[in-house]
Amino acid sequence: MNKLIVVDKKKEVKDYKRLNSTARKDRNTKKKRVRKQRSNKQKNNSNTLLFMSGYALIILIIVIFGILYINKYVEMNKINLQMNQVQSKIKDLEEEKQKLKLNLSQYKSLDRIENIAKVELGMVEPKQVKYISMNSKNGTSLKQNQDLHLNDRLVEISKLGEKVSTWLQGFSQVEAGTLNNE
């Protein structure tokens, strides 16, 4: 085996073979240390990434729930606004209905109708008013029918009275031997 011995400027003698093996060991240890540090950094980075993604997920969930809450609040306000508009429209329509009822009663008023008949249509009031009863039979009114019925009954009663009086007179004027058998 060849040994390489070198004297450097400081006049130190060094055994490069031994130095090389020590340097190699140092380099290998250094590489292992660097690898460990890299793997530790990667583990730390992955742990940090895991924590960051967890925090991001939590923040995302909070934001989504916040948006949903705000959306529901906005929808509720829209519905309340629509409800208020409908109630206002109902109130306006009821007021309009009252105005129309008032107008209708004005148009139905007898004074207005009489004025239109006289002024616009040129009608005049009659000098004599004749009434026709709507409850009539055979062209006579109901009162006339009742009067006629009463008169008929009175006539029948008077005829019956005459018959009774003649019959009673027959009892008082009975002659001997004559009996009227009617």
Image: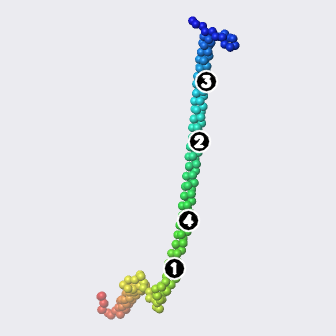
Q: Nearer the viewer, mark 2 or mark 3?
A: 3
Q: Amino acid at mark 2?
A: Ile
**Residue, disc 3:** 37
Is the residue marked by circle 4 packed among few (<14), some (14-19), or many (20+) residues within 10 Å?
few
* Residue at mark 2 to residue at mark 4: CA–CA distance: 43 Å
Three-letter amino acid code of the residue under disc 1: Ser
Q: CA distance from mark 1 to mark 3?
A: 106 Å
User: Disc 2 or disc 4, which is closer to the eye?
Assistant: 2
Q: Residue furthest right?
A: 10
Q: Are marks 2 and 4 in contact (CB under 8 Å)?
A: no
Q: Amino acid at mark 4?
A: Lys
Eye-nearest disc, 1 or 3:
3
- Disc 3 vs disc 4: which is toward the camera? 3
**Element at label 4:** helix
Tell whether label 3 touches label 1 (CB within 8 Å).
no
Give how far across and how far down residue 56 sits, in percent. Answer: 58, 37
Separation (CA) of disc 3 from disc 4: 79 Å
The image position of residue 8, as x and y in percent, is 66, 13
Residue at mark 4: 91
Q: Earlier in the sequence, mark 2 or mark 1?
A: 2
Cα separation, mark 2 vs mark 1, equals 70 Å
Marks 3/4 in contact by CB < 8 Å: the verdict is: no
Q: Which residue is mark 1?
A: 109
Residue where numbered disc 2 is placed: 62
Colour convention of the picture = rainbow
